[in-house]
Image (cartoon, rainbow, N blue to C red):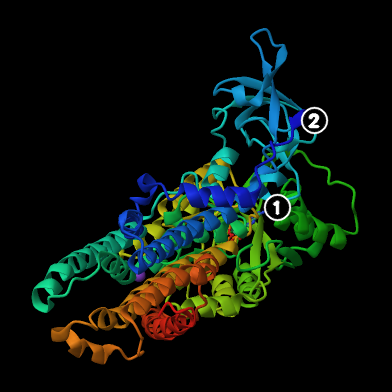
Amino acid sequence: MRTQPAASRPSRFGELVRDTLVKLDPRAMVHNPVMFVVEVGTAVTLWLTMFSSPGPQRAYDGLVTAILVMTLLFATFAEAYAESRGRAQADFLRQSRATAQARVVQGDGTWEWTEGTALQRGMRIRIEAGDVVPGDGVVLEGVGAMDESAITGESASVIKSPGDSVTAGTALLSDTLLVEITAEAGQTFLDRMIALVEGAERQKTPNEIALSALLGVLTLIFVLVVVTLGPITLYYGKHVVNITTLVALLVCLIPTTIGALLSAIGIAGMNRVAKIHVVAKSGRAVEVCGDIDTLILDKTGTITMGNRMATEFLPVPGVSLEELAEIAWMASDTDTTPEGRSVVELAQHILQRTQALAFSGESVPFSANTRMSGVDLADGRRVRKGAVDAIVKMVGQAPTALEEAAERVARAGGTPLAVAVDNRALGIIRLKDVVKPGLKERFANFRAMGIRTVMATGDNPITARVIADEAGIDEVLAEVTPEGKLALIQKEQSQGKLVAMTGDGTNDAPALAQADVGLAMGVGTMAAKEAGNMVDLDSNPTKLLDVVEVGKQLLITRGALTTFSISNDVAKYFAIVPAMFAGVPLLHGLSALNIMDLKTPQGAILSALIFNALIIPALIPFAVRGVKYRPQSADRLLLRNIFNWGVIGVIIPFVGIWGIDHVLGLFGLA
Ligand SMILES: Nc1ncnc2c1ncn2[C@@H]1O[C@H](COP(=O)(O)OP(=O)(O)OP(=O)(O)O)[C@@H](O)[C@H]1O
Ligand SMILES: [K+]
Ligand SMILES: [Mg+2]
């Protein structure tokens, strides 16, 4: 294998320190209005410190400056730390991006080694057994087994034949393929996924932009209040308020806590989805997950176990069990789905034979559109098995015994497959559906959060209903085709709902693109992966439930910390303002507000400022890991949050500032 290990990276700690410092650059900071105001304030107090005459005032200015610098560093550290955790996640993907070399095919049919980084769209490359695929492309010639575990996490190999797409980072296990490159070097699927997870392409989401604009306006109001405070107290109280004190007051009042943590919260949301091996193409996608109203799930593989097994043949009167078994075998001989394989095994068991059936014909693979599979025999007969309604349509008129058997199977929660030859229905195959364990509780949680779950399945209405009731699904749509799913999503959206779904096939692509959250399976087709806004590398259809939970937690965390930040600031107001005007005769009534009995104005301000700085690192774990929440409706959650985090936010500063004031007192600073 011609691969080189990825270049070793600088130490995580070094990177963290460097990023924390680099983010102090005012040109970067200006995007965060709250922290930018803190930075400007820091510049002012630093200037005062440097150019005032030595003495207690200068020491005070210096102390305030130091605390403000700490505040800024805590804020940039929060973001850098969240980003560094994201990079650790990206390593999972990077392992598979060892830079490969490519065998580029020349005009005369020979090939030459070329760096993978020089590949261009339209080039033709040869891939031999043992090679790592150097770029994304489509197979022109050859058939071979591909190990796609690097990008999908699935260990089973996948057969690639002409027309199939191949992905950089996967490895060819057998044979030789001629591939046309479809993506420029550095722009492969894997490259884009890594860039996204690393946050290089992270953009603020619309909600984040709205919130930071709101915080900006709040900040502006406080700037105006504080700037006018100086002249007012001078005029009414003949009292000169110290500029350093005004800066400190301003920083305490503006929402620095959420200003410092906002971006870390968003990055952490992306990281949490990456941790469950889901790649989100945008932060917005993760955020929308938290607002989902309708969750569309399919049945087989998502709600029930994927390997649906045939357990019984039910022939109609006049047909023997052996005849039904033989025809069902014929219809499944080339069917590689779990259903098809299990039908063959059951038939072999019933017929007591393992040698191949002797017949010739052209196989008709299963498709979700026809909902049938089978074989067109050389003698012209059409042998089929499939969804009962689809088979009944094919045969024209079905015996009532067939319908009865199908209903019996469905009522027991199984999937009935009908078997027919031309216009003669022979009987029913019972496929056993088993609901995955633990789903019922999760659906109950979603209901508590006000999310509606809809099962859209190709299966018949009775089986669908039985399984839905067993799993605790709200609604069912049965006998749907991929177009039917698309129509369902559009209908929900026209009622103003946000819809999430998962899918894997090319025919799911339109629905994945239409959904507000489209989670494509990693083993799915490239079309599905391009259409969705998220990709699950583990290809686990139940993952959608996890992703929605991460999105909810992201929104709740942001709401909780915003509430906390603002109520905190209100409390600080009561801590500082009375102390500040302690010496102003006309305003001495304010001292009634000095309920913490802070000794000196300077001590009060320093304590509040230190508390204001320390609360940022104290909340980093909540920002990064997300706050805990109980599943309930959005409105009640909001109320609860405002209550819990708001009330705690008011109380904590009093305790914290009082405590810090006493510690400062020990050092003679308050
Ligand atoms: N290999 C197969 N051969 C013939 N018919 C099949 C095969 N697999 C499934 N079917 C029939 O086609 C129907 C539709 O299949 P489809 O995959 O669209 O839905 P499903 O597997 O039942 O449910 P879901 O949509 O939840 O995956 C199935 O309900 C079944 O009746
Ligand atoms: K503040
Ligand atoms: Mg299916």
Answer few, some or many: residues within 10 Å of disc 1's Cα (few below 14, many 20 plus, some between 14 and 19): some
The reply, left or right, for residue 519 in relation to residue 384 is left
Find residue 72 and name its label.
none
Viewer-nearest residue: 492 or 466: 492
Determine the quadrant in which ligand 2 lies. Answer: bottom left
The reply, left or right, for residue 626 in relation to residue 638 is right
Determine the image quadrant of residue 254. bottom left
Q: Position of residue 7 (x, y in %)?
A: 69, 36
Residue occupied by mark 1: 337
Comparing marks 1 and 2, which lies closer to the viewer?
2
Residue furthest left as drawn: 235
| Mark toward the start of the polypeptide (1 vs 2) | 2
Q: Where is residue 203 in the image (x, y as percent from the top left)?
A: 41, 49
Viewer-nearest residue: 217 or 452: 217
Amino acid identity at mark 1? Thr
Q: Is mark 1 within 8 Å of ligand 1?
A: yes
Residue occupied by mark 2: 1
| Residue 499 appears anywhere in the view | no
Residue furthest front as drawn: 54
Amino acid identity at mark 2? Met
Viewer-nearest residue: 144 or 421: 144
Name which residue lies at 33% across and 71% down: 252
